[in-house]
Image (spheres, grey):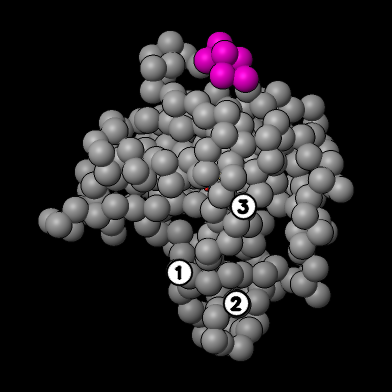
């Protein structure tokens, strides 16, 4: 797999890739390496993760030979407030890589699930290290893409809404991993307005009835009416009462079993 990925990568990127047959979590290792000074653009790819991590403290199942599990270390040298669109940028880059290699463009469920025909194909976990001066020391973008799984391969807890690329089109994991590494390391984060325009076009949450699910709160229902320049979701909970949502889980009515 490693040789296949390297074959598809542009030469300047090849030395930046660290490949693991098995690792606990590429994000955990990327954070460790970032703290030790690993350079901007370092890419970690694993065939198998024993402790893949998802958002909100969840696990991300990462069996061998089935997915692309990748983390990229960035050193953008800016304030955290200037990176609010980072996850959106990563989702757009991941859609580009899938489209380029698999032939269809997934949608994005706010904020960072790649979806197709009602199935979650991929998730993104971004983590930041902030220096004592308050600037971003490092950012780690972790992406897990389900490539070859069949429906029965998924854990029963997620089987009804998880999907893989191969369910919709033939998928070459090595080609996809190379395209993803290229897309993530090549992101122009300064082009925030352009990124957000593409993000909004891809975001299937916009215009839909949604529920906001937060720990220790009753679910609140509304309509997703916009996404601001930071990637926050604007939800109308009552006529002309719009709230900016930065955190929490959003369910879309009619999707993933929410009716
Ligand atoms: C989510 O859907 O909640 C986010 C999942 C992110 C999974 C990826 S796989 C590569 C990287 N390493 C991890 O441990 N997590 C991310």
- Alpha-carbon neighbours of circle 2 within 10 Å: few (<14), some, or many (≥20)? some
- Mark 3 Cβ inside 8 Å of ligand 1: yes
Q: Position of residue 98 (x, y in %)?
A: 64, 33
Determine whether the residue tagged by mark 3 lies in a helix, strand or loop: loop
Residue 189 visible within the image: no
What is the span of residues highlighted in magenta in the rendered image? 1-8
Q: In terms of image quadrants, where is residue 7?
A: top right
Residue highlighted by disc 2: 212
Q: Residue at x 55, y 81 (%)?
A: 215
Determine whether the residue tagged by mark 1 lies in a helix, strand or loop: loop
Which residue extends farthest right? 152
Residue highlighted by disc 1: 246
Q: Along the horizontal axis of the image, is 31 left or right of 60? A: left
167 to 210, vertically: above or below:
above
Q: Position of residue 128 (x, y in %)?
A: 34, 53
Q: Residue at x 46, y 74 (%)?
A: 244
């Amino acid at each position: 797999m490693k040789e296949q990925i390297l074959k598809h990568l542009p030469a300047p990127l090849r030395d930046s890739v660290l490949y693991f047959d098995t690792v606990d979590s590429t994000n955990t290792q990327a954070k460790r390496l970032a703290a030790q000074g690993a350079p901007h653009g370092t890419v970690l790819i694993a065939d198998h993760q024993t402790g893949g991590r998802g958002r909100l403290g969840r696990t991300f199942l990462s069996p061998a030979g089935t997915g692309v599990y990748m983390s990229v270390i960035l050193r953008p040298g800016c304030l955290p407030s200037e990176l609010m669109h980072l996850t959106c940028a990563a989702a757009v880059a991941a859609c580009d890589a899938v489209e380029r290699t698999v032939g269809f463009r997934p949608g994005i469920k706010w904020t960072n699930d790649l979806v197709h025909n009602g199935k979650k194909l991929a998730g993104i976990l971004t983590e930041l290290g902030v220096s004592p001066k308050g600037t971003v020391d490092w950012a780690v973008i972790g992406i897990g893409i389900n490539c070859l799984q069949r429906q029965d391969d998924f854990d029963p807890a997620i089987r009804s809404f998880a999907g893989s690329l191969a369910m919709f089109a033939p998928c070459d994991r090595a080609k996809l991993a190379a395209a993803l590494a290229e897309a993530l390391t090549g992101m122009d984060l300064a082009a925030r307005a352009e990124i957000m325009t593409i993000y909004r076009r891809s975001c299937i949450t916009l215009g839909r009835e949604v529920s906001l699910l937060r720990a220790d709160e009753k679910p609140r229902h509304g309509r997703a009416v916009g996404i601001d320049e930071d990637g926050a979701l604007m939800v109308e909970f009552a006529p002309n009462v719009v709230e900016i949502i930065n955190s929490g889980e959003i369910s879309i009515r009619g999707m993933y079993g929410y009716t």
